[in-house]
Image: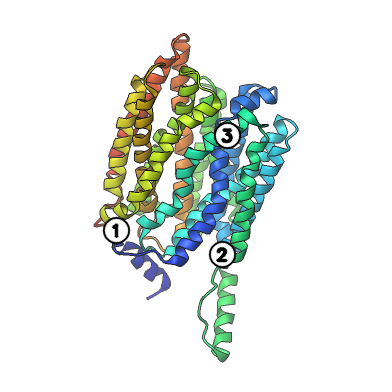
Amino acid sequence: MTTATTTATAATEPESGGKLDPAVVKTALILIVGAMAVVFDTTIVSVALRTLSVKLDTSVSTIQWVSTGYLLALGIAVPLSTWGLQRFGGKRLWMFSLAVFLVGSVGASLAWNVGSLIGWRVVQGIGGGLMLPVMTTLIFQAAGGKALGRLVTYVALPALLGPILGPVIGGAILTHLSWRYMFWVNVPFCVIGMLLAWRYLKIDGEGTSGGGGSGGSQGAGAAAATAAMAKPKLDVFGLALLAPGTSAVLLGLANAGTGSGFGHANVIIPLVIGVVLLVAFVGYALRKSSPLVEIRLLAKRSVASSTSVLFFSGFSLYGAMLLMPLYYQEVRGATALSAGIMLVPQGVGTVLSRTVAGGVIDRFGARVIASTGFAVVALATIPFALAGPHTNEWQLAAWMVVRGFGLGAVTMPVMVAGYVGLTKQEIPHSSVLTRTAQQIGGSFGTAVLAVILQGGIAAHPTAPANAFHAAFWWSAGFSAVAVLLSLTLPGRAER
């Protein structure tokens, strides 16, 4: 039986009784330390755009490029992760991406104007775009398809902690310190993450047994020859289609979210160009034997269903990340720090879900857990669609805990579903597909809810609460639709 067949078989076996290998847990924790830099950076900057526009004396539309530029760089870097893993190995690529993110963070903290800040954010985006798919790929490859539900509780840890601590840290820095210190939060995570990876992360292929004597030498020679053959050339044409295609779609969606809707040239033109390039890449990848990203994986139900659910979950996850802090600031008059503190209960709920969801995923499968989680998110969003400026904040905090629990329950099983039944070689491609779908879906959801919110504010300029009511109703509705999509995910028997 070949290695690929063995891996595929292991990935489809029941996992409810599996235990995590301590070596896999160690690998996960090493990678998570570095990944925390990306998560904290994203959540901190999201609450700082208004302050940055004032401090750098620039318009909101210009300062928005601090986020948009980062997002576009992510779109370019994510597809490169599959080639980089094969060409340089997981350890080297991980340390390189951490170093790039570190350089971008220090540069952003020293930015002398808005243009330089946007430029350094692009550098950060390149590092972050490599880090996130590489992290999930290395962890799931190390697990060999065993106890995926328990394992994903480690993979999802940065995403769970970020919403708790990021807005609070960002609000505190903006209230008491210079905005430049926001980017220094990333530095210790990057430095410690690089040191841990250098010291403890295994080089690809390390630990294999080669026997003794001349047999060992022959085995080593064969391994070296195989490694040399396994280093592919970069699919330049595929990258020239996929990277700008993804970036153009993200640019169009970002313009829709910061402008007055989808009916403008700066939205329509990038979206059309991006869709044409992505369709061209799909046609090209289906004809090529070894494309940059293996689109044919979408023929597998597990990958296709998780990709579609992750795309649509962006409306519930990322769209609400836009609405929640704005609601507390615009409707209730909270400061940036106070708004960050108000979001803590949602993060607490996500952490609570982590304590129970891992084993439950292995027992019941992704379908039941994800559909239930989206239903909880939808129900817990409705109170905000009814809330006004003076609604009891403790009641809203309680609903935030419930909503966070639902969000945590959604994130983990959908992530697991994207790797069920895959070989080790297929895992990096699934990481890119699911990450890209989540990224575009998040941008799409944010843009749609931003347009709805802006339209409501324009219609009721003296009653912003009404605009937020409409946006929250739409968010709840998107979560309800996601419940139906979750029914396509693999069930327990299929695992």
Label 3 or label 2, whichever comes before in sequence order: 3
For label 3, the SS is helix
Percent across and percent down for residue 156 are: 44, 49
For label 2, the SS is loop
Q: CA distance from mark 3 to mark 1?
A: 41 Å
Label 3 or label 1, whichever comes before in sequence order: 3
Q: CA distance from mark 3 to mark 2?
A: 31 Å
Under mark 2, the amino acid is: Leu
Measured along the vertical axis of the image, is residue 193 above or below residue 222?
above
- Alpha-carbon neighbours of circle 2 within 10 Å: few (<14), some, or many (≥20)? many
Q: Nearer the viewer, residue 42 or 88?
A: 42
Q: Is residue 95 visible?
A: yes
The residue pinned by badge 1 equals 495
- Alpha-carbon neighbours of circle 3 within 10 Å: few (<14), some, or many (≥20)? many
Q: Is residue 474 visible?
A: no
Q: Nearer the viewer, residue 278 or 447?
A: 447
- Residue in the image at 29% along x and 36% along y: 375
> Which corner quadrant of the image does residue 49 belong to?
top right
Under mark 3, the amino acid is: Gly
In the displayed structure image, the side of residue 99 where residue 426 appears, left or right: left
Percent across and percent down for residue 467 are: 42, 17
**Outermost residue, bottom side:** 213
For label 1, the SS is loop
Q: Of the numbered discs in the image, which one, if any, rests on residue 170?
A: 3
Q: Of the numbered discs in the image, which one, if any, rests on residue 201?
A: 2
- Residue in the image at 40% along x and 44% along y: 351
Q: Are marks 3 and 1 in contact (CB under 8 Å)?
A: no
Percent across and percent down for residue 96 are: 64, 56
Q: Nearer the viewer, residue 351 or 206?
A: 351
Percent across and percent down for residue 380 are: 32, 31
Measured along the vertical axis of the image, is residue 439 above or below residue 356?
above
